[in-house]
Each structure stands twice: as structure tokens, then as C-alpha cells.
């Protein structure tokens, strides 16, 4: 009887569309790999938010690009783009300009929020500037940047100069 129950639970969990039992590999990419797989890396302030009708679903934010740190050949230059994310309910954190150990010590120590399906969304505040890795789902792909002295910004800028 126990085997039947375990088999049933296994089937139930394996077919669930919302369950995320194991984080995808891309959630654990190191910064260099994250940079390499991203379509583009941009510095952009959130300029507008279109809230979702359902507060449990992400809003749509509009961003204005102020700097490209990576732009793949063949990708046209754009000035604005939209991205789903959640409104930041607390004071936005840049992890002390990304010097704070919690950002570096924990894989999910970033400006992201999951919805249970393994998809991650950034947490945004209109008017704040973010370093955004486009085309990749990663816990650190939507980080708040308050100055160019920020450690995360400096690291990504350094990687961009390596021409990899």
C-alpha cells in the first residue's frame, strides 16, 4: 500500500505545472557564465509600472536603457524595453553597494522573487536603476545599482572589458 501511495505522490508531483523541486542549472551560473549567456546586459532605470489585475502576478515595468555593458552582434540597439517583475514592497536594497556578504554568500541572495515554478522575477521600484541581464533567468539578473562604485556593477563592467 505504501508503494502505491509513493507512486501516486511521485506522479502527482512530476506533473504539477507550478512545482519547482530542483532549481534550474542557470540559477547557479557564476558571474562570468551569466554574462556570457545573456543576450545583453544593460543599466536601466524603471520608468513606469503597469500593475497586474491580480496582485499575486507580476506587473509590467518599462525601462530606459542608459548604458549597454554587453550587446551581442546582431541585436539591434533599443532605447526602452518592458519586463515583468514585482513591485518592491520594502525599501529597495543594493546590499550595501553589493559589498554585503548575504549577496555573495547565498545563491539566491539577490533582487529576485520566485513564483514556485522556478521562474524568477526582479523586484522593481519606479525611478531606481537596475543592472539587467536580458535573456537569462538568474537570481542576480536584476540588481539595484545606486552608483557606479557598486561592486556588482564594477565586476560586470570588468567582465565586459575581457572581450569573452
Image: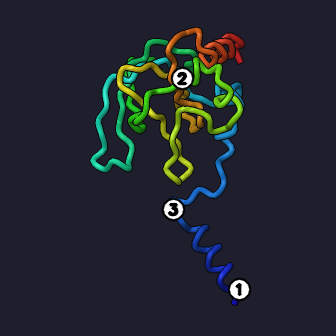
Q: Earlier in the sequence, mark 2 or mark 1?
A: 1
Q: Closer to the camera: disc 3 or disc 2?
A: 2
Mark 1 nearby-residue class (10 Å; few <14, some 14–19, many ≥20): few
Q: Are marks 2 and 1 in contact (CB under 8 Å)?
A: no
Residue 35: image quadrant is: top right
Q: CA distance from mark 1 to mark 3?
A: 25 Å
Q: Tell me the residue that label 2 is attached to.
A: 94
Mark sitting earlier along the chain (1/3): 1
Q: Which residue carries the number 3 mark? A: 17
Cα separation, mark 3 vs mark 2, equals 33 Å
Q: How is the image coloured?
A: rainbow
Element type at mark 3: loop
Q: Which residue is mark 1?
A: 2
Q: Please state if 31 lies on the left or on the right of 96 as rendered.
A: right
Residue 162's place in the image compared with 75, above or below, is: above
Mark 1 secondary-structure assignment: helix
Q: Viewer-nearest of labels 1 and 3?
A: 1
Mark 3: few/some/many CA within 10 Å (<14, 14-19, 20+): few
Q: Nearer the viewer, mark 2 or mark 1?
A: 2
Up-down relation of residue 103 to residue 70 (above or below): below
Q: Whole-Å distance between the Cαs marked 2 and 1?
A: 49 Å
Q: Residue at x 69, y 90 (%)?
A: 1
Q: Is residue 155 above or below residue 3?
A: above
Residue occupying the point 64% across, 40% down: 27
Residue 46 located left or right of residue 27? left
Amino acid at each position: 500500500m505504501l508503494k502505491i501511495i509513493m507512486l501516486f505522490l511521485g506522479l502527482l508531483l512530476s506533473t504539477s505545472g507550478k512545482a519547482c523541486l530542483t532549481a534550474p542549472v542557470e540559477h547557479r551560473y557564476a558571474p562570468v557564465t551569466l554574462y556570457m549567456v545573456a543576450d545583453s546586459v544593460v543599466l536601466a532605470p524603471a520608468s513606469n509600472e503597469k500593475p497586474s489585475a491580480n496582485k499575486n502576478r507580476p506587473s509590467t515595468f518599462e525601462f530606459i536603457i542608459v548604458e549597454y555593458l554587453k550587446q551581442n552582434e546582431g541585436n539591434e540597439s533599443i532605447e526602452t524595453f518592458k519586463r515583468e517583475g514585482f513591485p518592491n514592497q520594502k525599501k529597495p536594497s543594493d546590499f550595501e553597494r553589493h559589498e554585503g556578504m548575504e549577496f555573495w554568500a547565498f545563491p539566491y541572495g539577490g533582487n529576485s522573487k520566485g513564483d514556485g515554478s522556478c521562474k524568477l522575477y526582479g523586484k522593481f521600484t519606479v525611478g531606481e536603476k537596475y543592472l539587467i541581464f536580458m535573456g537569462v533567468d538568474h537570481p542576480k539578473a536584476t540588481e539595484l545599482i545606486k552608483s557606479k562604485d557598486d561592486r556588482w556593477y564594477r565586476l560586470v563592467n570588468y567582465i565586459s572589458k575581457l572581450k569573452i
